[in-house]
Amino acid sequence: MGNTKEVIESGAAVMGLEFGSTRIKAVLVDESGSVLAQGSHTWENRLENGIWTYSLTDITEGLQKCYKDLKEDVKKTCGITLTKLAAIGISGMMHGYLPFDENGELLTGFRTWRNTITGEAASVLSKEFRFNVPQRWSIAHLYQAILNKEDHVSRIRFLTTLAGFIHWKLTGEKVMGVGEASGMFPIDDNTKNYDEAMTAKFNDLVADNNFPWKLTDILPKVLLAGEEAGRLTKEGAAFLDPEGDLSEGIPFCPPEGDAGTGMAATNAVAKRTGNVSAGTSVFAMVVLEKPLKEVHEELDMVTTPDGSAVAMVHCNNCTSDLNAWINIFREFEELFGHEVDMDELYGKLYKNALNGKKDCGGLISFNYFAGEPVTGLSEAGRPLFVRKSDADFSLANFMRSHLYGSLATLKVGCDILFKEENVEVDKLYGHGGLFKTEGVGQGILAAAMNAPVAVMKTAGEGGPWGMALLASYMIRKDGEDLGTYLSEKIFAGDEGSVMKPDPEDVAGFNAYIEDFKKLLECEKAAVKAF
């Protein structure tokens, strides 16, 4: 504790703060990446007029409550008030749509990554660019607003993401880390900037509208990991810490998305490495050795925080339905007057799932709270559980089917990457809530991907920790590239706990996924009918 107090009091600590889908979390780390303190705030998106969103009040209050919780943790553990930091990094869920006018006023409600309302725009842009543009990307939202003839478009002067917005409020800088920027508009692998040819095509595509802006006028400036992206202003300090204790002038690294922070948090920024982040949504990132042969609408092309090409499979749904079923079991326990330890409940149910049949015994789970473009469901989803009349309907099979279901859509996309494109990966790193119970989510992911999966001791730290590492890299790099810095100064050879795929599990998941794909028509019918 003495060393922790000394690091924080001297202003040597670095803060990473990330806006996740259900929780905003901040961490302080020291030079080695060890967590010194943390704070969090729980929040939830809402469906308003068919749009998944968070209000500006939600965002502002969430930021301030999270930071206040961090301050209180420092006060409680060290007996001091947090007043200065060595560096700050801001991250958030990627993509979405936050357009601002010349006065800095938001022109629409925040349209998050979870929305699947830009199908027409994504299709047109993908064809024009000969490059897959997913529905959740900022450029798809912009072009859909143009196709919809929304009158706010001509008044846009800045278009950004959640991380970019918070960074702007704190520093006054309209910038973006390249990984986050690659989820707004395609990035050129050579220039590490927005693709000029595609930018020109977009401007030509919308030229008849006579907007008073060109695309690059309204997009944030792209920066690479390690570059300084501004400093905390007096107004920014008051916005983050209304109590007035935090000093201005703290340097910021480029804001990044949760994909980039996941790569940093798992030391998966080098070629032939990859990571899977499994929480409310789930995505797999694989750093490529060479370009893909074909354009696939199931695969996104993004970058690492230092600009290397990455193939990404992103699924809108992962643990939400699984968590909902766990809560049913919690209610059952409470009905009998039992005090429930949620960690114990998750652990017992997850571990019991390993006793189920490898193919789940005829039980299939669709975890679709939101639509899933990877499997062709662009409308809102309908969580659905299906079983054959002669299925082996046991608790173990039930839980196993929901664990499989949380990764099923990811497997559909990754099968294209590994089986059709023959992309090779030496190891995948898992992080996020799905991997908290030792050996369960990890083993199921290994079966789904048919690849070794490593989970590090730091896997639970997640995105805010990864963001803190990127901020630390900015001020502490000594000529190293990001991969070297992470490997040598943060992870120091730690490869984590590795599980190889069990052949029987692989065969079981493959059998499950065939039934899952056949039943997609059932899911589509549920959306239409209910």
Image (cartoon, grey):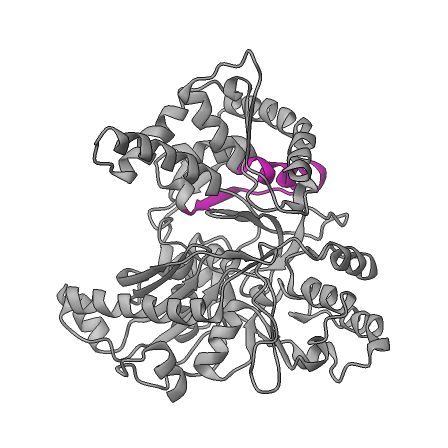
Which quadrant of the rendered structure holds the C terminus? Answer: top right
Name the residue at 60% across, 22% down: 511
From the top left corner, tell me how far across and down residue 507 is, in percent. 57, 22
Q: Nearer the viewer, residue 334 or 254?
A: 334
Q: Residue furthest right?
A: 208
Q: Nearer the viewer, residue 167 or 473?
A: 167
Q: Is residue 501 visible?
A: no
Magenta-drawn segment: 407-432
Q: Is residue 334 left or right of residue 62?
A: left
Residue 196 figure quarter: bottom right
What is the number of callouts on the image?
A: 0
Name the residue at 24% across, 75% down: 82
Which quadrant of the rendered structure holds the N terminus? Answer: bottom left
Question: Looking at the picture, does residue 446 appear above or below residue 479?
Answer: above
Residue 84 magenta: no
Q: Is residue 241 left or right of residue 125?
A: left
From the top left corner, tell me how far across and down residue 192 is, in percent. 64, 69
Q: Nearer the viewer, residue 157 or 514?
A: 157
Q: Residue furthest top?
A: 390
From the top left corner, tell me how far across and down residue 492 is, in percent. 36, 54
Q: Is residue 474 left or right of residue 519?
A: left
Q: Is residue 69 visible?
A: yes
Residue 421 magenta: yes
